Amino acid sequence: MPTFELISHALCPYVQRAAIVLAEKQVEFTRIDIDLSNKPDWFRAISPLGKTPLLRVDGTQVIFESAVICEYLDETIGPRLHPADALDRARARGWIEMASATLNSIGGYYTAPDAAAFAAKAVDVRAKFAQTEAALGDGPYFAGDTFGLVDAAFAPVFRYFDTLDRFVQPSVLEGFPKLAAWRAALAVRPSVQGAVSAAYPALLEAFFRRRNSWLSGLMPRAA
């Protein structure tokens, strides 16, 4: 078994994907958090895009981009998290891209500068959630009884709302019962729980407060 180092940022949702897959594979790995606002030189030297996550394999080979990292792990270490059928696999890859698009929309939501922009971004996020709701079956996971890479991609999406829902009601997830059930199933899975540190909720709240956005204005002053 190769040795793995996951180069991480404490709040990066894409890092969470890789951490979830590593945990599902029951692979030991070292996690190294960096400050993306003050990137160390060694990180700049090995990260072509200057982003996390990176997966360093055997101390020398570096893989970047979360989808590529997850596919590599799935191709080389069991159990397989992608469907065996090529068409089902292609569909799963498409929904992983939808998870990324949803994360981008959420970024616009929490950084919206005023009420009008905030409302417009909420509509955008809800539109993506409506499309995802329509694609879900009976669960508990995206593909039914089997946890897969789509689940690993969406778990960080839902985790944002553990914090956002404390300050914004109704939640943009309101009215999507299948998403609610899926979110709940993912939240109790050990790999998902372990993908962030115990400090994550407080760090995320502090991150939102620093945005000077419409959302940060909705948040009560920190004690």
Image (tube, helix red, strand yellow):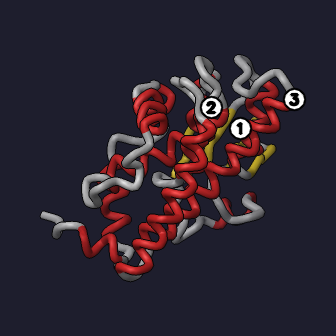
The answer to whether mark 2 and mark 1 are in CB contact below 8 A is: yes
Q: Amino acid at mark 1?
A: Cys
Query: Where is 148 relative to 131, above or below?
Result: above
| Kind of element beneath mark 3 | helix
Tell me where residue 136 appears, x and y as whole percent. 59, 34
Give 200 or 100, whichever is nearer the viewer: 100
Q: Amino acid at mark 3?
A: Ala
Residue placed furthest toward the right: 86
Q: Amino acid at mark 2?
A: Val
Sequence order check: which comes first, mark 2 or mark 3?
A: 2
Tell me where residue 6 appears, x and y as whole percent. 62, 43
Rounded to the nearest whole Å, what is the CA distance between mark 3 and mark 1? 17 Å
Question: In this rendering, does residue 135 appear at all?
Answer: yes
- Mark number, residue 70: 1
Tell me where residue 180 appears, x and y as whole percent. 42, 37
Q: Which residue sits at x=60%, y=24%?
A: 147
132 with respect to 214 (left or right): right
Sequence order check: which comes first, mark 3 or mark 1?
A: 1
Mark 2 or mark 3, which is nearer to you?
3
In this figure, which residue is indicated by the disc labeled 3? Answer: 86
In this figure, which residue is indicated by the disc labeled 2? Answer: 21
